[in-house]
Amino acid sequence: MTNANNASHDPAPRPPQVSEQEDACGAQRVQDRIGRRFDEALGESIRRESGAASLRIIRPGHAYTMEYQGDRINVHIDDNDTITDIGCG
């Protein structure tokens, strides 16, 4: 009989690694902004500190182009203007 507490488990998968090519917008440098309330000054500091060519704010329920631009940083915010995700595109 196997004790459930002694059952072997596979280790959790490693998080995906982002190569420099995939992080052309510098999103990895500004991940500490997630959870903060977005305003224009914070948006400008994200764009400047990331080194991205441009900044796009993505709000719930709004339409956006699907065109991928690797040097553009996307800041996703929720209905309360809290940053939920930052990535390239």
Image (cartoon, grey):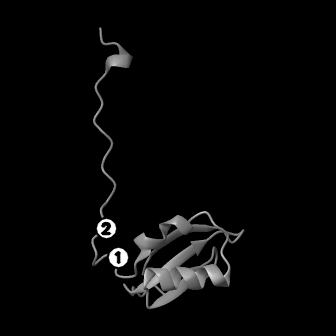
Q: Disc 1 residue type?
A: Asp
The number of numbered badges drawn on the structure is 2
- Write the residue at 39% across / 85% down: 68
> Given contact means CB atoms under 8 Å apart, are the residues at marks 1 and 2 in contact?
yes
For this orientation, the residue located farthest to the right is 80
Place residue 16 in its image quadrant: bottom left
- Write the residue at 48% across / 81% down: 49
Res. 84 mark: none
Q: Which residue is mark 1?
A: 23
Q: Up-down: is 3 above or below 73?
A: above
For this orientation, the residue located farthest to the top is 1
- Write the residue at 40% across / 82% down: 25
Image quarter where the N terminus lies is top left
Closer to the chain start, of discs 1 and 2, is 2
Q: Up-down: is 71 above or below 19?
A: below
Apparent side of residue 60 relative to residue 17 in the rendered image (left or right): right
Label 2 environment density (alpha carbons within 10 Å; few <14, some 14–19, many ≥20) = few
Q: Is residue 64 visible?
A: no
Q: Helix, strand, or loop for circle 1? A: loop
Apparent side of residue 28 relative to residue 16 in the rendered image (left or right): right
User: Residue 42: x and y, percent?
Assistant: 62, 79
Q: Decide which of 89, 2 is in the foreground and name it.
A: 89
Q: Which residue is mark 2?
A: 18
Q: Helix, strand, or loop for circle 2? A: loop
